[in-house]
Image (cartoon, rainbow, N blue to C red):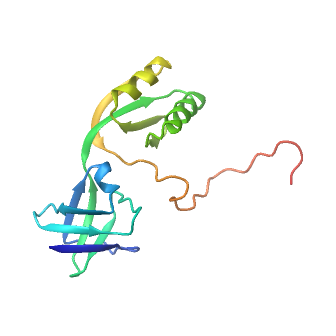
């Protein structure tokens, strides 16, 4: 069985195989998987590792494996204004619902209870199939530089 212990920090684009997984399996750092070629492999990654679509894994034998996000049932809510979207994100974050946040929209793994909550709040929710790319979280994100100046209330520090 192929053993995979490492994510390449700077992949060069070369891959030998692929691994397609839904989000809940991409969040498991230790598991037995079947690569897209049918080859069996063991993921032995550091605990807490969450695989992202496009990651390249390095096996002990030098094989490079491209990670792909599988198609899965999702729900999507779209928003015309930022305040409404912020309110929805706040309530979903309070419930620890992993979110994929886009411009004017959020997506999450389909959950009828969450769908009903958002609809009760007055938001339209639609079901779709697609890959899920949730936010990694504040402690796992690379530093992001926004293209805006800070806004100060009162005097500048």
Looking at the rendering, which quadrant does residue 84 occupy? Answer: top right
The answer to whether 143 is drawn above or below residue 61 in the figure is above
Looking at the rendering, which quadrant does residue 13 occupy? Answer: bottom left
The answer to whether 97 is drawn above or below residue 8 in the figure is above
Residue 12, given in percent of the width and then of the height, sits at 33, 75
The answer to whether 146 is drawn above or below residue 153 in the figure is below
Residue 16, given in percent of the width and then of the height, sits at 19, 72
Of all residues, the one furthest to the bottom in this rendering is: 61
Quadrant in which the N terminus appears: bottom left
* Horizontal side of residue 151 vs 115, given as left or right: right
Q: Residue at x 31, y 68 (%)?
A: 56
Residue 82, given in percent of the width and then of the height, sits at 58, 32
Residue 45, given in percent of the width and then of the height, sits at 34, 69
Q: How many marks?
A: 0
Q: Foreground: 127 or 151?
A: 127
Q: Residue at x 44, y 36 (%)?
A: 106
The answer to whether 81 is drawn above or below residue 102 in the figure is above
Q: Residue at x 86, y 54 (%)?
A: 157
Of all residues, the one furthest to the right in this rendering is: 155
Q: Residue at x 86, y 51 (%)?
A: 156
Q: Foreground: 74 or 54?
A: 74
């Amino acid at each position: 069985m192929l053993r995979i212990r490492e994510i390449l920090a700077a992949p060069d684009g070369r891959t030998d195989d692929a691994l397609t997984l839904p989000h809940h399996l991409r969040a498991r750092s230790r598991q037995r998987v079947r690569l897209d070629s049918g080859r069996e492999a063991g993921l032995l990654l550091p605990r807490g590792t969450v695989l992202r679509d496009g990651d390249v894994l390095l096996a002990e034998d030098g094989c490079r494996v491209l990670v792909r996000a599988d198609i899965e049932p999702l729900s999507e809510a779209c928003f015309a204004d930022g305040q409404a979207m912020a309110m929805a994100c706040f309530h979903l974050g309070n419930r620890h619902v992993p979110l994929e946040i886009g411009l004017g929209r959020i997506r999450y793994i389909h959950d009828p209870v969450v769908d009903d909550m958002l609809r009760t709040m007055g938001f339209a929710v639609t079901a779709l199939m697609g890959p899920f790319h949730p936010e990694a979280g504040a402690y796992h994100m690379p530093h992001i530089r926004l293209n805006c100046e800070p806004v100060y209330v009162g005097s500048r520090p």
